[in-house]
Amino acid sequence: MLVRDVEQIRGTERDVDWGNGKSYRLVTAADNVGYTVCHTVVSAGTTSFLQYRNHLESCYCISGLGWVREVSGTRHRLRPGVIYILNDHQPHYLCADEDDDLVLLSIFNPPLVGTEKHNLNDSVASSY
């Protein structure tokens, strides 16, 4: 059985500044369970253009408010209790409202190594 507290992750290589927030990689490929679980914090007031070309991702909102916007312009409101699933490697914009960080539980399949970071300076969606 694996039992891990997010506090055990802080300050380790699994505590990743992904560009517009923090990702605490609770479960990674090294854990041999076939998926990754992250406690993801999106910094208030940020927008990130993302695409996971090698992974499927599900994100469940734990706290805060924000949006996930498709490249077509369709926006989906994120609030506690809402899940969004990127099941076709869709490029998307992840936006946190100005007043509060957006906190998500993110699941990746296949699993992440755990040290991946985004490059948010490119004109194309950041990917890994």
Image (cartoon, grey):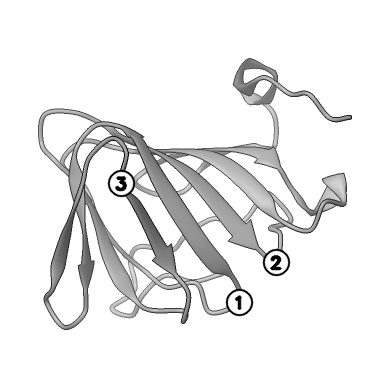
On residue 82, the disc is: 3
Inspect the image, locate mark 2, and give the three-letter code of the amino acid beneath it. Answer: Pro
Say how many tags the image has.
Answer: 3
Please name the residue that numbered disc 1 is placed on. 54
Res. 45 image quadrant: top left
Q: Residue at x 34, y 46 (%)?
A: 20
42 sits left or right of 96 in the view: right
For the residues bearing labels 2 and 1, Cβ distance under 8 angstroms? yes
8 sits left or right of 66 in the view: right
* Coordinates of residue 54 in the picture (x, y in percent): 61, 77
* Coordinates of residue 40 in the picture (x, y in percent): 46, 40
Q: Residues within 10 Å of mark 1 (few under 14, many from 20)?
A: some
Task: For the C terminus, give its image quadrant.
Answer: bottom right
Please name the residue that numbered disc 2 is placed on. 110
Regarding residue 2, the answer to whether it shows in the image is yes
* Coordinates of residue 61 in the picture (x, y in percent): 35, 40
Question: Is label 1 in a helix, a strand or a loop?
Answer: loop
Foreground mark, 3 or 2, reads 3
Marks 3 and 1, how far apart at CA: 24 Å
Q: Residues within 10 Å of mark 2 (few under 14, many from 20)?
A: some
On residue 118, the disc is: none
Task: For the N terminus, give its image quadrant.
Answer: top right
